[in-house]
């Protein structure tokens, strides 16, 4: 049994990733974490990561005694950079008041 790809790197937004399984027997899938990883046909669906931490999981493909694992790494969302706030209208016209 061949499974491709063996690794997936996803952005924090997640997405759908095509994979292929070449096997001459029936096979099943198991997701390490069903809250953010699922399988839909020949797609691995990865949900958005709302944490700033990277996370890892996998999809295990089993056919009789054969086992293949697709490792998944997903980036954490970027921390929002705080802004100083305000707008240009908040400054006075007089240069000495800046």
Image (cartoon, grey):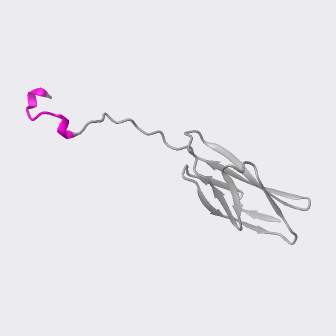
* Residue 20 on image: x %, y %: 72, 67
Q: Residue 77 magenta-drawn?
A: no
Inspect the magenta stretch and tell me whether residue 90 lies in it.
Answer: yes
* Quadrant, the N terminus: bottom right
Q: Quadrant of residue 30?
A: bottom right
The percent coordinates of residue 37 (x first, y second) are 68, 53
Query: How many numbered dots are placed on residues in this image?
Result: 0
Q: Give left or right: position of 6 versus 12.
A: right
Whether residue 16 is visible, yes or no, is yes
Task: Using residue 36 as the reference point, say whether residue 88 is left or right of it.
Answer: left
Magenta part, dominant SS: helix
Choose top left, top right, bottom left or bottom right for residue 63.
bottom right
The one of 54 and 3 positioned closer to us in this rendering: 54
Question: Is residue 5 at all visible to an observer of this figure?
Answer: no
Q: Nearer the viewer, residue 92 or 96?
A: 92
| 53 sits to left or right of 29 | left
Instruction: Classify residue 65 as left or right of residue 55.
Output: right
Q: Residue at x 68, y 49 (%)?
A: 35
Magenta segment, which residues?
88-97
Q: Image point 30% across, 35% down: which residue?
A: 85
| Pick the front one: 54 or 35 | 35
């Amino acid at each position: 049994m061949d499974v491709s790809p063996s690794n997936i790197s996803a952005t924090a937004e997640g997405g759908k990733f095509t994979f292929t399984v070449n096997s001459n027997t029936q096979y099943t899938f198991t997701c390490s974490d069903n809250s953010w990883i699922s399988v839909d046909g020949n797609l691995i669906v990865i949900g958005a990561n709302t944490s700033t931490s990277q996370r890892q999981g996998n999809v295990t493909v089993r056919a009789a005694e054969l086992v293949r694992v697709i490792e998944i790494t997903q980036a954490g969302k970027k921390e929002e950079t705080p802004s100083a706030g305000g707008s240009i209208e908040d400054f006075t016209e007089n240069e000495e008041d800046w």
